[in-house]
Image (cartoon, grey):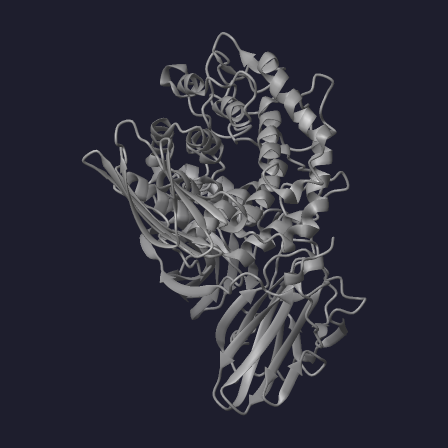
Amino acid sequence: MNLPTCFKKHDIIANVIWANCERDIDMYVVFRKKFVTENETCSIKIFADTYYNLYVDGSFIHRGPVRRHENTAEYDKLSLCLEKGEHTVAVLVHHLGAKVAGHRTGEKNFWCEIETENGKIITDESWKAKYLDAMTTDGRIFSHYDFVEDIDMKKFPIGFMNPDFDDSAWENALVLFKAESENDIHKNYRQRTMKLFSYLTEKGELMKAGTFKDMPVEDDRFTHKIFGRVRDEAEADGNYSLYKFEKTISGTVKIAYECEEDSEIIVAYDDQLTHEGFVKPDRWSKYADRFLVEKGKGEAEVLFPRGFVYVLVDASKGCKILSVTATKEVYPYEEKKSFFADNKLLNDIFDVSVRTQQVCTIDGFTDCVNRERVLWLGDAYFDCMGNYYSTFDKGLLLTTIYEHAMGRSEKGALGGYNSSNMRPDWLLMPSYNLMYLEMVIDYLLYTGDEENILPLKDTVKGIIEYILSNINEKGVFDTQFVGCSNYWDWGYSEPDGENVKFGAYFAFIVDRMKEFDFFNDIITPEIFAAVEKIKEVSHEIFFDEEKKVYRDSSSSKLTTQAATSYAVLGNIKGSENYKELFGNITNEANLDVIPMGENQAQENNVPDLNKILPAATMYGATVTARTMFIKGLYSEGLKYLTEVWGEFAHLPTLPELRRNGANNTACHGWSASPAYLLPMYILGVRPLKEGYNEALFHIPNFENNEVTGANGSVITPKGEIKAAYTKYDGFIKADVFVPKDIKLTVKYKEKEYLLIEGANTVYIKA
């Protein structure tokens, strides 16, 4: 794939170095180098495969790099202010070297360039290097969360980052090859497009402590399963401490302890507790970290980030846990208050949505930080949309779109998660591929940046060709794709075969593409004809005459809220009576219970086919809310949104499922669509043409005055649109600041007003 001009290659002169070690996977290596500055500033360029921790003069500086495909590898550049004199740089590198969902396999790689006024210090054989045999891992790995850490602190070079640490016994580094040479699989090195993390320290609150004998039998399984062994009677007198943090964190944990003898400390993480008040044993015992520590006082710290609200520390008898602290990595969201209304519940929903997306933004838009640190394509779509309204981080948006394009298979479709070379054809999920097409459309609409997405035309064409290859003689799609179902929701086993959701959503996307000249050479007359056929025949194939809603599949009587919502979104023939259709799928008397997650052994895993299945997730519920708003059903859409999201508005972050199940999280980015739905439709500000050349301030008409005022500041490439409306005494007062070069229309019902640049106030008869 050709890369856009903003991905300009930077020349690197450093050598790739490593330590002497026979291992190929799960390797930890430490590097050290002293250097001298004559003034107070220097800069550091740094890259490693898979992760590095950078320390200068004993202080932690940064973790990196961000996860990327090897053809778009990104190094970090940091500027430091240092006193004149000698300084010490130390870097701890963890190389995975294994196929996992969150990373490419990669190769052993570390390079660094330190630039001072006297020139550059580069990685070469003068650097000290040590393989850490203190990491006694037994190879336990969760494909979505990397290796666990099993550290023998008696062998660990404690204080290796400090200037006075004695590294005289360490060997000199091995030079593998020049960075960017033909031997380097990482190509097109470029400077990090995402912003550098900020780091905050938070102290955990001790919730409870006791001995293993105090633990309920159900939760005592945790102590019996860790590291594949069962405790004997001598170990049964160990103790536990449970700590809580304010909200879900991505970061490292430091345990301060005092031991009467050499001891074992095991650390487990979760963002939920069992009924007995402990982290879930079946879920986290296999992901726990372990420290073997010496007698006396000390500190043990996990080297690379975990995700958690709760930390359960399991210690041997005679080992007292003094405190648990966390160093949080925080993506610097420059949040704008893009939505505020005279409705507290809506404001709470908006705030928790933005907060959830912020926590889940680490190496890109991440599924979640505590169970799957994976860059799923479906989550990225929702997070990109929220980003346009909450922070408009263009570099992050563009990088996300290209990183997922790197996951293209030979069939043309994209993998469900990227970057990863773990079974790339396993998850060519049709729903996610359609979402990717919308990601490209929306990037063009919100930014107007056609130049930098030109190389993606082949990707878009490949997806559409793959999609069309699954159309059958009836003119609808047969979705028996390779993968774990179609993933329109995560609440039921979706039936294979002809699928109304897929065809209708594809029709909606093609209709959107028609609005842009950019896609003229992609959307051919044949595709237009295929879409019209989908619209024509879908009602006959999928409409359930008895329930007056759409079935998901021709092979099943299953009916879901999503099926009807997508049918209306795609404007298939027969969906014109959308108000009645939405009434049918939201009428509580027609609904089955909320499901708990696909293929879970729950009491309602097999839906009642006489009922309509509601969304199991807020991710799945988004299409219903969105389509209601698009069709102008503001009161109905707002009622649905507040019913679904309002239940969770009091939480620190939004959970993955609407019902608590066995394998869900309390902080999931795909749940946070109100971060854009509310400013887009309830405030009513959105672009009409590329780059906000034309924009709309559409004041919604609520039947019962559910919202009588809203305001917000929406970022555009041309400046901020500041908008507000208030309803009173039969009038609507609309205030809007229009940046230069934007044609903005204020609309209420059928009334439209084209506004000029600057501050405007319009009074409209309600």
Relative to residue 497, is residue 724 drawn left or right? Answer: left
Vertical arrangement, residue 310 with respect to residue 480, above or below: below
Q: In which quarter of the image is residue 150?
A: bottom right
Figure disc tally: 0
Q: Is residue 614 above or below residue 226?
A: above
**In the image, 710: left or right of 114?**
left
Closer-to-camera residue (403/34) = 403
**Residue drawn at point x = 37 percent, y = 61 percent:** 202
Furthest residue in direction right, as rendered: 182
Is 583 in front, or is 26? 583
Q: Could you tell me if residue 316 is visible in this image? A: no
Q: Position of residue 234 (x, y in %)?
A: 46, 52
In the displayed structure, 355 sits above or below 411; it is below
Q: Which of 600 and 422 is in front in this view?
A: 422
Q: Quadrant where the C terminus lies?
A: top left
Residue 711 percent across, percent down from the top left: 31, 47
**Residue 562 in view, yes or no:** yes
Q: Residue furthest top?
A: 546
Is 122 above or below relative to 738?
below
Residue 615 in the image: x percent, y percent? 46, 28
Q: Measured from the top left, where is residue 119 in percent x and y? A: 64, 87
